Amino acid sequence: MGMLNTLSKGTNYDAISTGGIDAIDSFTFQHEALPVNVEGKVFVSEALGMSGGILSLNSLAPHTSMPFHHIHIKHEEIYIFMGGQGEFMVDDNRFEVTTGSVVRVAPEGVRCWRNTSDSPLYYAVLQVKAGSETVKNTIEDGRGVNRPVIW
């Protein structure tokens, strides 16, 4: 079973490692609401001390599909594909996803996806409460700090 390793921790940050993208295959997610354990899934939100979203890292075995469609009540999801090739479906729309694809799905969107390749499909999923973002871009939220960059 996979382990999250702490790289560093400070007052304003947490840094962890799964051990590499292919190490995601070794994680198993267990939850009492699910009839089976989910192989290749790890929620890293808690280990990172996240307070504004939920982040999972995932692997889907070659030529397999998510075994169910699902929606959310409050969360929109952002899927970031980091390796492999697959097909994604939202409502009745199907489209190809591959390394570099990014998909946002509204809470009420009925979603499912599958791996169409001979290698694992690696992806991250970020869940955030729909409508919670009030800043239109990072320029509005970010602030420069008067500090020279010295490494």
Image: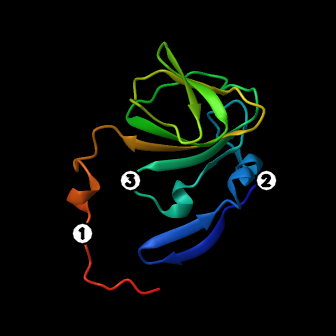
Front in this rendered view, residue 137 or 96:
96
For residue 40, what is the image quadrant?
A: top right
Q: Is residue 27 above or below residue 105?
A: below
- Residue that label 2 marks: 1
Left or right: where does residue 119 sit relative to residue 130?
right
- Sequence-wise, the earlier of marks 3 and 1 is 3
- Sequence-wise, the earlier of marks 3 and 2 is 2
- Mark linked to residue 143: 1
> Residue 151: image x %, image y %?
47, 86
- Sequence-wise, the earlier of marks 1 and 2 is 2
Which residue is painted at 73% across and 39% down in the image? Answer: 120
Which residue is painted at 25% across and 73% down in the image? Answer: 144
Q: Amino acid at mark 1?
A: Arg
- Mark linked to residue 52: 3
CB within 8 Å, label 3 to label 1? no
Mark 1 Cα shell of 10 Å, populated few (<14), some (14-19), many (≥20): few
Q: Using the numbered discs, state the Cα–Cα distance from disc 3 to disc 2 in whole angstroms.
A: 28 Å
For residue 82, what is the image quadrant?
A: top right
